[in-house]
Amino acid sequence: MKTVETRMASIVIPNQNEDGDIFVPVQQRVVEMFIEDFGGATMYECHGFWSKTHKVISCVKIDVAVDVLPEPVARFMEIVQQVANTCDVHSIMAVKPDGCVVFVEGE
């Protein structure tokens, strides 16, 4: 019997953008999608720092265990793209299950 390898993936979502738009509902929806698609998620409060601003950016990091197969990885990246499309920020940082860090811009 062949077993599927599962690895941790994550997304970092700010709590709000510079215009004051609050992303808590987006964060909650991502957790719900991760539960539905992958069986669970873990969310942490964190702070981000970026060279383009001197402000501390309040964020959450959401970890999810993803099977290392094309379909689950593609679904994870679809969710990341949805977040990038929803949030009016420069980009959303995510770590794919293979460990690759990506910065996804909204469309």
Image (tube, rainbow, N blue to C red):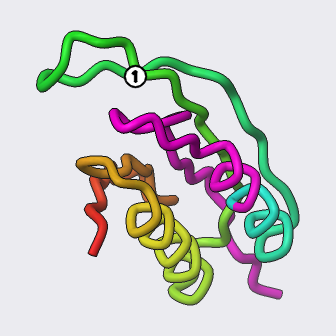
Quarter occupied by residue 4: bottom right
Residue 15 on the magenta span: yes
49 or 73, which is in the foreground?
49
Give residue 11's position: percent from left, percent from top: 52, 48
Q: How many marks?
A: 1
Quarter occupied by residue 39: bottom right
User: Start and end of the magenta stretch?
Assistant: 1-29
22 or 102, which is in the foreground?
22
On screen, residue 102 above or below 71: above
In the drawing, does residue 19 fall left or right of residue 54?
A: right
What residue sits 26% from the left and 62% below the top? 105
What residue sits 57% from the left and 53% below the top? 9
On screen, residue 103 above or below 48: below
What residue sits 63% from the left and 55% below the top? 26
In the drawing, does residue 103 fall left or right of residue 21?
A: left
On screen, residue 1 above or below 85: below
Give residue 100's position: percent from left, percent from top: 34, 53
Q: Could you tell me which quadrant the C terminus lies in? A: bottom left
Q: Check disc 1 and report the residue beneath it.
A: 48
Give residue 35's position: percent from left, percent from top: 84, 64
Check disc 1 and report its element: helix, strand or loop.
Answer: strand
Give residue 56's position: percent from left, percent from top: 37, 13
